[in-house]
Image (cartoon, grey):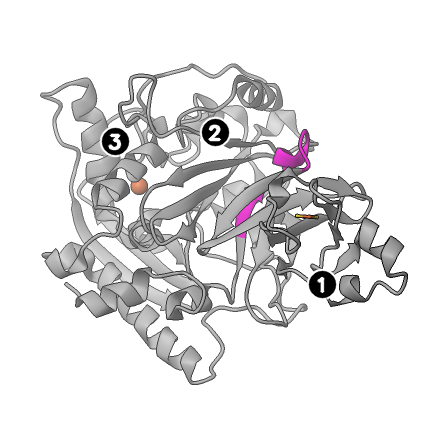
Amino acid sequence: MLSEEKNRLLTEVGPGTPMGDYLRRYWHPVAGVAEFDNKAVRPIRLFGEDLVLYKDLSGNFGLVQRRCPHRNADLAFGFVEQCGLRCAYHGWQFDQSGQCTHQPFEEIVDVEARLRQKTKITAYPVRAKAGMLWAYMGPAPAPELPDWEPFSYTNGFAQVVMAEIPCNWFQCQENSIDPIHFEWTHNNWTGRQQDSHAEHVPTHLRTLYEEFEYGFVYKRLRAHESEANPMWTTGRVTLWPNGFYLGHHFEWRVPIDDHNTLSILWVLNKVPKEREPYVQEHIPAWYGPLRDEQGNWITTHVANQDFAAWVGQGAITDRTKETLGASDRGIVMMRRRFFEELEAVAAGKTPKGLITDAEANRNVFLPSACRDEMMHGLTRDALAAHPLLGAYLRDFFGQYGQPDAVREAYEAAIGQKTEGARFFSVHGGRPTGDAGDEAA
Ligand code: FES
Ligand SMILES: [Fe+2]
């Protein structure tokens, strides 16, 4: 349970708020590079600011304020030039730094372009990496854009999967340090949606949370597992400040504003060794819906189950009305760490886990329960039998709505058809079930 004031401290992300300013000290993935295959400009809202993301004719990306400073036209209607974006109303043009570089009629009248030189709009650096576009909205100089090791894994098929979630970012991130929910949200709920008498899966017996440079590691031991299980020996990473790393995929929860969050998943699936060498030419990016055609929440896929849980907590969950228990130890640790960080940064300290040394930012290691397999690959049979990775050969259960073209590209990569199941049995799903049971 938290006071109202402390809840606000965790959840308010607009400009000038302690958490908003804190999070702006990090690079955040905000879109898929592939979104700009067929369009050049689109609006985007981040940390309570309305912005426009574009790819100019030189192939450079820019992120600038949404309103034109001339007479407030919407720059999302603008069009790109060789260098930068031009307003579609009177043609003022802005480069990546936000500097106005052309004011067509003004420059006829004033050849010295005095007005143009003083016109500058808000602009943020944006970079492409791993098929995602990353933005940095904090003070200069920007830190390094993390080069997490999995971004360099070879012989894999990556995809960027997004959704806009109508709730605050922090309740989404609390899910990154909440092992117990797997058993209920992903195993038992999945079971009961198919069969109202389905037996519950084996329960968690122990959890452990450890802090490290780039966040926390959580470990869990379930009733059907031994202490040699990699979920207990290695665990998973609560990636600071707003990510989750599970060895074969990342999840980030990027604030759109106080009441909305961009969920962005980067999922990497190894192709069977028989398909190596495989080089992915194009990393697809897609958005999935939250509701079906009847308006009902989609609760079949792993991320959708999480989304329903988070949104169900309320737009900004009321942490004055909680009943925390032993299952929430990680959450309490994470909240406490954020409060300490906000104080430390206010006192001039560097935020946790920020990478500022380019030399140190090469293939940055993160603990992973399937690192060996993701680095070196597995034969088709071994992959199919793998407790964490096998299910990906059968279906994309990560999030609902995968476009057919993405599925087909994946099938071509792995050299087999997927099954198109409606429900999925994921990690911990059954004690004696087939080996491909453990996936999420
Ligand atoms: S409003 Fe943008 S150029 Fe006039
Ligand atoms: Fe989950």
Identify residue for label 1.
119
Label 2 to label 1: alpha-carbon separation: 60 Å
The residue sitting at the front extreme is 109
Residue 38 highlighted magenta (yes or no): yes
Instruction: Count every numbered label the image shows and give the total.
Output: 3
Does residue 39 sit above or below 181 in this rendering? above
Question: Residue 326, image x and y in percent?
Answer: 13, 58
Q: Secondary structure at mark 1?
A: loop
Sort mark 1 into few (<14), some (14-19) or many (20+) by Cα contacts within 10 Å: some
The nearer-to-camera label among 3 and 2 is 3
Residue 247 visible in the displayed image: yes
Tell me if 316 is positioned left or right of 243 in this view. left
Residue in the picture at 44% in, 55% down: 48
Q: Locate ligand 2 by image quadrant.
A: top left
Q: Which residue is mark 3?
A: 429
Q: Give the residue displayed 24% in from the left and 69% down from the top.
A: 6
Dot 3 amino acid type: Gly
Real-space CA distance between mark 3 and mark 2, rounded to the nearest whole angstrom: 20 Å
Label 2, secondary structure: give it: helix
Q: Is residue 331 left or right of residue 74?
A: left
Compared to 107, does 41 lie above or below?
above
Q: From which residue to which does the magenta span run? A: 29-40
| Pair 2/1: label in front | 1
The disc at residue 382 is 2
> Are the two marked residues, 1 and 3, in contact with CB atoms closer than 8 angstroms?
no
Q: Is residue 155 visible?
A: no
Q: Nearer the viewer, mark 1 or mark 3?
A: 1
Magenta residue check for 59: no
Residue, x 52% and y 31% (percent of image)?
286
Q: Earlier in the sequence, mark 2 or mark 1?
A: 1
Q: Callout 1, which amino acid?
A: Thr
